[in-house]
Each structure stands twice: as structure tokens, then as C-alpha cells.
Amino acid sequence: MTEPETSLSLATDFPAATQEEWRKLVDAVLKGAPFERLESQTYDGLAIAPLYQRAAEARAIAGRAPGAAWRVMQRVDHPDPAAANAQALDDLLNGATGLVLVFKGSVSANGFGLDASAATLARALDGVELGADLPIDLNLSPATRHVVRDFAALVKTRGDTPARIDLRASINPIGGFAAAGHSAQSWEQLSQSFAAMVGDLAADGFRGPFAVSDGRIIHNAGGSEAQELAFALASAVAYLRALEANGMSVAAARDAIYFRLTADADQLLTIVKFRAVRKLWARVQGACGLDPVPGLVTAETAWRMLTRRDPYVNILRNTIAVAAAGLGGADAITVLPHTAALGLPDGFARRIARNIALVLLEEANLARVADPAAGSGALEALTQELCAAAWSQFQDIERAGGVWAALESGLIAQKVSAVRTRRQTAIAHRRDILTGTNAYPDLDETAPMVLEVPPWPEPEKDLATKPLPRIRLAEPFERLREASDRMLTQTGARPRIFLACLGAPADFTPRASFAVNLFESGGIEAASKQIEPTTVSTTLETANTPLACLCGSDQAYESAAAPAAAALKAAGARHIYLAGRPGAHEAQWRAAGVQSFVYEGCDALSVLQAAYQVLTG
């Protein structure tokens, strides 16, 4: 078969489209509404427009080597060192290309992790062939920092050459201070021991990097992308200064530092965050008189996005997060298994976590192109705007005396708290959706298996300290679902609400479906029935609940809402809702017995919490 002389192109048959023509079509659809309605805003206040022009002059950001796969880092976190060793060997046999040793009390330990003894470290790595092609990333806490020296001693005991070991030591006293809320030493004292530990590893022949600037602490606390970047950058600068002040050259200090950021299910912002950190670090290097070189940037999927309810959706969230971090240029990615919020993940959950990255690498080939976001109008614009926002917040930290001083004064905690409150409000109002939790719940779901391993006992808390919190956004709704489960266990039935449906099915189905979704997100089972005011008493008695919600169309409400509410009240309903905004009829409907209105954008969490007070009062 011969090839045609010219290739066919349908595009040549049409005139080139322009942004002005697109805008005219959009304005016609908006019918006078402001164009800004099509824009969205990030928690940093960055506007995301509906359309961008190509950034033709943009160039790829230097990062992971072109065509190189990111490292698939698998967690080793079983408290039993023999079991942890079995995990590690199985992971390496089945596609993992690096290990993250998680120690008790570290930021991502989730209640589990290895104890910090030299014997445990040796047993967990028994049979694991350490070498340049196997990165080992340590996840430590202030109390387990000595593991770095134990690892160095283990390498010597085995007769390995330190220069061959890809050790990412994760020394991070600033992160430890932020997570714990206190430190036994001042930064002036701690910076010297920090520099000594880094210097000892370098003197032993390890290549590093040794110190990590860890943004997860900010993300876990509900912070924004700019706040996470600013904290990580400020930590890196503090480490640069400490290492230089203790005799290390600026270039060597730069090479001793790496970054760890969080990847979450916001695909656009995760991509631009990982691009932005490289541009910000290059700017710091330039200010230090260095020719910028790409640093090591690692990723871990987000703890705060994980849910205990419908946890299989976490697989989708993790997939988006891994893809975004990989496209953003992460050198290594660690996936928190989809059951991590339920307990210690079993072999199946660990395999899924590992295979998410392997499928994206080996089947989707996402690593084949270096910086695929380069030239995208949206991603280039957002990267620049995020860099500017993060740099501004970094400067605020520097003006406060540096990151340690900003933590001591509460500056960082205050700013993060403000964003966290806005996030939690958006979750409560269901503007931010967590599928399976605050929307589209399944009250009959079966929880997946986790290992029957108890977590480490919680350490006693010092009430005088103020650590940055570690949250999951789903927790308030999960507490309501847990209350529902307890009632089911104790009484044989979940809490219920009676949906009194007015008019024909076409009238009440949309709002009844909305009400089912809302109330069941709090574990309150919805029983619906098409009613007439004369039959309310019997149907409410059959439903066996003090809660009732009117569901119907606006037209049906005009004539039937008030008498139906009055009938429900007379029949013994202690709290009556109406699905929809009240509008001009609010006073009339309230007089008839309606106490609350539920609608898209209402404070669903407060509605549900108040419903439980009625049920248990």
C-alpha cells in the first residue's frame, strides 16, 4: 500500500478560531452574567480562567532527566521488623524501585512504623541489596534522628561502600519542631548538631542528599500550595545557612538538601506546585551566586484527602495525585495505600499503591516527555502565579526572622489555620466534594481488610505545645457515620428521616434525591413516601422517626408545603426540614412548622449535627 502524497487535514478547511470569537459565543450563553462566573479561585487567591492561549515562548523546566521514570518508592512501616522485611523484599521483587523506611512517630507513620533500634533497622533490611540503584529514604522524627547514624554503621558492618548507597537521610529538625510544637533546643544549638550530622555523613563518603525540606507538614495541616512551598523553601534556606556557617561550601550545602512535597487530587495545582518548587529553588541558588542545578524533589500522596468511607475512591485520588506529581517532574513518588486511614494496609492495598505508579509509567508512559506542561498556557500561567505567591510568603517568613522564628511566633500556624478553616467550611457546605463521604454515600458499604496490628500507643501530649495539626478533611462527616454505625449496632436500626414527597414523582424526585444524598452523608437513612396531608400521621408513625423533610417542586410547595408541614407537626415530628431555598414563603412555612431549609450550598455538616441532637435529645 502506497502512502498518499499529501496528508489530509480537516483543520485546513476551516478558518482559524480566535479568542475573540470564542468570547462572543461565551457572552451569548452568559446572557449578561459576568464573565468571572467562569473563573475559579485557589485557596491562595489565584484565579483560574476558563481558557488560556498557548505560551509559545516557554521552555521546559530542568528537573528529572528526560525520559527517565520517577522512582516508585514503597513504604516499609510494619512495626514487626521481620514482617517489615518481608514487605520490603516483596515490593522490590514486584516493581518498587526504592524504599521509604518509616519510623515510629514520624510525620507519615500513621500510628505505625519501625521502632528506632539498630537491631530493628538491620532486620528490616536483611537481604535487601543496598546500592546506588536502590534509594533508601528515611522518615524520621526528632526522637528517631539517631537512626541516621545507625544506618551509616550498618553500611560499614556489611562492608558496603558508602558512596554506592543512595541514602536520603531526611534530617529535618525544622519539620520536627513544626510537627511537635516544641524543641528541647534552640535553633542556634540545634543547627550545629544538624550540620555535624550532615557533615559526618559526607565525611563517611555518602553522597546524599541528607537534609529534607518537607512541605507535607503544611499540607497535612490544611495549608495552601503557596504556604507549602514557602515553608519548604524557607526550611531549605535555613539549612543552607546552617551548613555554610558550620564550614560547608554553599555548593556542597545546596547539594545536601532535597525537597519532599505532597501530591493530592487537585491535578492542576499539583502539577504546577512541583514545577514551581524547581523555579523557586533555582532563584535561591542564583541569589547565592550559584549556577542553578536541578535538586531532588520527592512526592508523597496526601493524607488529608484520604477517607475511611468508600476508601476505594482513594485509589482514584491517588492515581490523579501520582499522575500530577509525575507530570510535574517529581523524581520519586510514595503512595499512601488507599486503606491507610483505616489501619495498617495489607498486601493487597500495598500492591495497588505500587501498581498505580507502575501502570502510569509502563502503560501510560507518563515519564517519556520532560516537563510536558511546558508551553501550556494554563499551566505556565499558574506556575508563574504560584511562584509569585509562594515567594511573597517566603519573604514574610524571612522578615519574621526565618522559619524557626516564624514557627515560634505562630505566624505560620496562623496563616495555615485561616486556610484550613476555609477548607473545612467548603467541605461542610459540600462545595468541595469527597465522594463517598460528604456526597454519594453508601450506608451499606463493606469496609476493606487491614492488618490486625495495633498502632503504637499515643505519646503523652504536652498541653503547652502548639504543633501544626494533622487532619483529614473527611473526619467531621466520618464521625457522624460512626455514630450511625453505633446506633445500628445498639438498636438494630440506623437513625432515619422521613421524606414527605409532595406532588407527582416528576415534582419531588430531584429534591428527594438531593435530600437522600445529604442526610445519608451523615449516616441518617432516608425513607420516602408520596403523601397527602391527610395521610401524614400514619406514614410518619410507620417511618418511626422524629425527623421529616418536605420534598417537592416550587409549584407543589406553593399549595402543599404549609398544610403538609402543619400535618407533620401535628403528627409528632420534632424537626421539619424543607428541601429548597425558602425565598418569599419563609415566614409562612416557618409558621406552619418548617424549622430548617436544606439546599445546595447550605451548611450540611451543621444540619446533620443538629439532626443528631434531635435524635438523641
Image (tube, grey):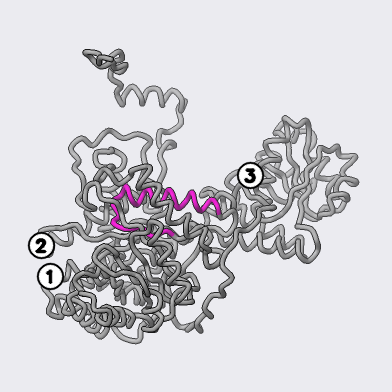
Residue 290: image tag: 2
| Residue where numbered disc 1 is placed | 250
Determine whether the residue tagged by mark 3 lies in a helix, strand or loop. Answer: loop
Q: Height in image: 274 above or below 237? A: above
Magenta segment includes 502: no
The alpha-carbon separation of the residues under discs 1 and 3 comes to 58 Å
| Nearer the observer, 385 or 55 | 55
Viewer-proximal residue, 34 or 346?
346
Q: Could you say whether the residue bearing mark 2 is in a helix, strand or loop?
A: loop
Q: Provide residue 546's location: percent of width, then percent of height.
A: 81, 55
Q: Disc 2 vs disc 1: Cβ atoms closer than 8 Å?
A: yes
In the image, 605: left or right of 169?
A: right
Residue 14, placed above or below residue 373: above
Instruction: Tell me where residue 10 appears, x and y as whole percent.
Output: 32, 16
Q: Answer whether labels 1 and 3 touch (C-beta < 8 Å).
A: no
Q: Report if the CB atoms under discs 3 and 2 are less than 8 Å apart.
A: no
Element on which disc 1 rests:
helix
Residue at image location 31% in from the left, 24% down from the top: 20
Q: Which residue is mark 3?
A: 599
Q: Earlier in the sequence, mark 3 or mark 2?
A: 2
Lateral position of residue 560 relative to residue 410, left or right: right
Image position, residue 587 (x, y; %): 72, 45
* Percent of width and height locating residue 524: 71, 54
Dot 3 amino acid type: Tyr
In magenta, the rendered stretch is 312-335
**Which residue type carries mark 2?**
Leu
